[in-house]
Amino acid sequence: MASTATSLASAGLKLVTNTGPKKLLLGKCYPCYVPKATRVYVKMMDWDDWLKMYFVRFDSYFTHDPDKIAKTGDIVLIEQLPKRLTRDITHQLTKVIYPMGDIVDPISGKKCMGGQFRDVEEVKDRLWGKNENAFDYEKAPPRGWQEGKKDWTHRPGQRKFHEFDDRDTSHMAY
């Protein structure tokens, strides 16, 4: 191990043994009942030494968002705060990467819908004929135009009082 580290150091490379705390994370916004905060779920991968494979795990973070720039369904970038604001709020919302429904493939730069590119669907529509009831992305108004009428993503989410996490059940005797 020491010889590997010295050979890497001589080549100008650094051997990373511990990644440390997670500073920047990418996640999806969910409804939140905490004022001036947004709940973000981040997808993590856990390595199982026995099975030699990764398993998906979701971590939930409450992020400081006083201006409520993120809405439910947005893909956001969050950054760890140097000091906790409250017991729950440990991160700060840095940027809204993709508003809900406006996902762009980072490699090709093409807009996506579901698991396919929008231009692939347009080619299919030209070949086979377009359904008259199909959604047209070009004519659609921007997200948020029905806020207060049919779009309630700007409101705080509902809390499910019949579901408890480990902090809620710690006082109960079994």
Image (tube, rainbow, N blue to C red):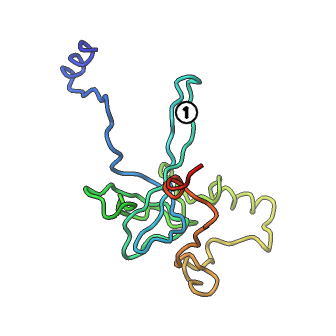
Question: Residue tagged by mark 1?
Answer: 54
The kind of residue tagged 1 is Tyr
Q: Residue furthest front?
A: 173
**162 relative to 17 in the view: left or right:** right
Which residue occupies 36% across, 59% down? Answer: 91
Res 15 → quadrant: top left
**28 relative to 146 in the view: left or right:** left
Res 65 → quadrant: bottom left
Which residue occupies 63% across, 60% down? Answer: 113
Residue 62 locus on image (x, y percent): 43, 61
Q: Closer to the camera, 106 or 44?
A: 44
Q: Residue furthest left?
A: 10
Residue 140 locus on image (x, y percent): 62, 77
Q: Quadrant of the N terminus?
A: top left
Q: Closer to the camera, 115 or 25?
A: 25
Q: Residue furthest top?
A: 3
Q: Closer to the camera, 80 or 128?
A: 80
Q: Closer to the camera, 15 or 160?
A: 160
Position of 125 relative to 45 (above/below): below
Residue 19 locus on image (x, y percent): 33, 36
Position of 143 relative to 95 (above/below): below
